[in-house]
Image (tube, helix red, strand yellow):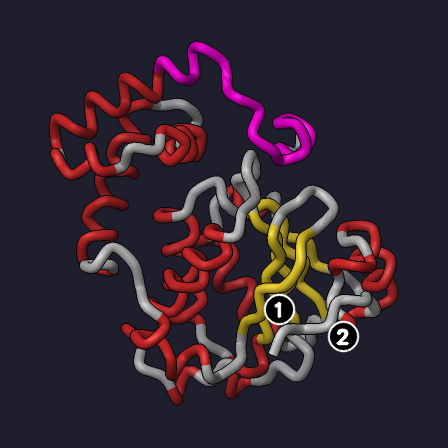
Amino acid sequence: MDDEHQHGHGCDDGGDVSEWKKVAEMRAVVEAQDPSAKDEDDDFVLRRFLRARDHNIVKASAMLLQYLSWKRSAKPNGSISDDEVRGEIAKGRIRLEGFDRLGRPMGYLYSARHFPARHDFEDYKRYCAYVLDKICSSLPAGQEKFAAVVDLRGWGYSNLDIRGYLAGLNILQNYYPERLGRVFVIHVPYIFMAAWRIVYPFIDERTRSKIVFVADKDLDATLHDAIDDSQLLDDYGGKLKPQV
């Protein structure tokens, strides 16, 4: 069953007593190995890692420890400032605008604006984390997931970046588990499917289940079904004007 329907339309379901008991056990395991885990005082963070590993405390703890290590090196100041990624922001690849009908913040990715030959790989990875932090910071109370549209209109070989796609996927899956609610991939050119076949084996099953390829003929109905007119960007037939 789709987790949107399983967990109260993607909103926080509170969790059951046995799940929170496992979260407490997991916290004890992780804090014993990495005292900095005490700084992660939000049990919902631990619960997302637990769910991402099907409530296996050993696997979830290992995943969380890996995340804490990554966080120290990727965000030594605790967060990534606008100034640190200003060059990446200027490329206009991503817009964060509006919410879907389930109250999840929306991100729009414009893949034809991504040119791997023109960026520093470390800057790009930092930008991926920056964007994920930004969209997660706009989550309303009780909502843990976001949704996205990946627009491939105009995508060509100069935009192809298998290394970049895998790096972004790694950050999303390993360090922001249970955050992605749904992603619509639209205006898909035929040549993109060769790249997709390379990337696909690296996508975990949970993430795969969230990815929807939308045919052009179904685009209007699909987006309007998922996003209210007032929250859908005007580029896609909605009434939301993008913020400058």
Nearest the viewer among 1 and 102 is 102
Q: Residue at x 45, y 78 (%)?
A: 89
In this image, 41 relative to 114: left or right?
A: left
> Picture coordinates of residue 138 (x, y %)?
52, 52
Disc with the residue nearer the chain's start (1 vs 2): 1
Neighbour class for label 2 at 10 Å: few (<14), some, many (≥20)? Answer: few
Q: Residues within 10 Å of mark 1 (few under 14, many from 20)?
A: few
Tell me, yes or no, whether the highlighted magenta stretch contains residue 13. yes
| 20 versus 105 height, above or below | above
Place of residue 239 in the rendered image (x, y in percent of width and height, measured from the top left)? 81, 67
Circles 1 and 2, Cβ within 8 Å, touching? The answer is no
Say what amino acid the circle numbered 1 marks: Met
> Nearer the viewer's eye, disc 1 or disc 2?
2
Which residue is more in the foreground, 63 or 205?
63
Rendered view: 90 above or below 125: below
Q: Is residue 61 left or right of residue 186?
A: left
Residue 227: percent from left, percent from top: 76, 53
Q: Along the horizontal axis of the image, is 52 left or right of 145?
A: left
The kind of residue on which mark 2 rests is Asp
What's the distance in space between the residues labelled 1 and 2, CA to CA? Answer: 24 Å
Vertical order, 234 against 120 (above or below): above
Question: Pointer 1: what residue?
Answer: 193
Can residue 205 be found in the magenta stretch? no
Q: Is residue 3 above or below residue 160?
A: above
Quadrant containing the C terminus is bottom right
Q: Secondary structure at mark 1?
A: helix
Q: At x 38% / y 36%, what residue is drawn?
A: 45
Residues drawn in magenta:
3-21
Residue position marked by numbered label 2 in the rendering: 235
- The residue under the point 68% across, 33% down is 9
